[in-house]
Amino acid sequence: MAWFRVNISNSTLESALFGDEPRDESLAQVEIILLSIIFITAGILNFGLLMVLWKRRKQLSRMRVFVFHLCLADLVVTFFQVCPQLMWDITDRFVGPDILCRAVKYLQVVGMFASTYMIVVMTVDRYQAICNPMVTFQRRRARLNGPVCAAWCVSLIGSLPQIFIFSRVEVAPGVYDCWAQFIKPWGPKAYVTWTTLVIFILPIITVIVCQVRICRTVRINFHMKTHHVGEAVSKPLSSRASSVAGVSKARVKTVKMTVVIVLAYIICWTPFFTVQLWSVWDVEAPTQTATFTILMLLASLNSCANPCIYLLFSGKLPNRLVALMCMGQPDLKESMQEEATMVSSLYISLKSLSDSR
């Protein structure tokens, strides 16, 4: 896959013999076809959703701000990870100067970091909205979203080592490629293990902990509300009670969406990182087989899945697609009210429960 073509050597020319081995042309054609499909699909879906959200930028709820930046991160993956890898597979060797090699490798990991940590901050924000609704309710909306800025800063800074690890090297007399150079034998192991830890394992642990606490809070609140309604069954429903009853669907909906996004990320990226770890910790790993290659390529499917998940959960999939072609279509304000009132309704819900005591 894109970011990891390692030349384990103490010097530029040593231990690069496998770079001279002829590639499997049939496998290369499969790579090119799969990457082309992923590139076109991810580009259209993310760019289309980004345009829909941009048209409604003045009405974006907090949740949709995260989705907007997740689309940006997936576009970075599409154009700076999938596209360069596609061109690389077509030409067999990296074509370009050293500065382009370093820039491509840097941007490839920026996309991976950004896509991952945007999911993390989205999940943490849902945790705050569900588990600490009063704090969230009192917090004013800022023009700059702090968690989003933090995710991009982590991505830009965390990818800097790529600039120094990868370079354009001579893998054979007169043959150059964009490879990483490590001190053997621990260099590749340290690099891949650390990358897996900060891009995959730690973020996954964070989102799983948040999701468990979110589900627990939703379950507790549901039982509390059911008990409260049961006690007041003889009383007529007030406007406040009807508001509390109506917000549960919006709350569960956003929780379900974040859960599905996290599951899609785990499903797409687990094979990739497993294969990478296997390739550096096992000297006999079948790295040149079709199974290894396909598993690594499928990781980019996550950039295709994210916009589909959001559009499906928004309940406005046909209208969203039509909006791309009809510039004069009116804004769909009703879909914004569901997320915009979630935090305030949670506040009212908890307040009414506390008053009943």
Image: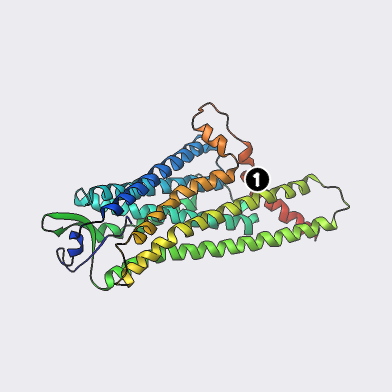
Q: Is residue 125 visible?
A: no
Q: Quadrant of residue 319?
A: top right
At label 1, the amino acid type is Thr
Q: Quadrant of residue 20?
A: bottom left
Provide residue 294's location: percent of width, then percent of height: 37, 57
**Quadrant (top left, top right, bottom left, bottom right) of the C terminus:** bottom right
Left or right? Give the position of 235 relative to 170. Answer: right
Q: Is residue 328 visible?
A: yes
Left or right? Give the position of 276 relative to 342. Answer: left
Q: Residue at x 64, y 37 (%)?
A: 334
| Secondary structure beneath label 1 | loop
Left or right? Give the position of 317 relative to 219. Answer: left
- The total number of labels drawn is 1
Provide residue 80's location: percent of width, then percent of height: 33, 48
Q: Which residue is mark 1?
A: 341
Label 1 crowd (10 A; few <14 / some 14-19 / many >=20): some
The one nearer the camera, 102 or 275, is 275
The one nearer the camera, 289 or 223, is 289
Provide residue 225's location: percent of width, then percent of height: 76, 57
Q: Residue at x 49, y 29 (%)?
A: 325
Q: Residue at x 46, y 38 (%)?
A: 48
The one nearer the camera, 287 or 224, is 287
Q: Quadrant of residue 255?
A: bottom right
Provide residue 355's location: percent of width, then percent of height: 78, 57
Left or right? Give the position of 47 relative to 90. Answer: right
Q: Residue furthest front?
A: 26
Q: Residue furthest top?
A: 328
Q: Residue furthest left?
A: 173
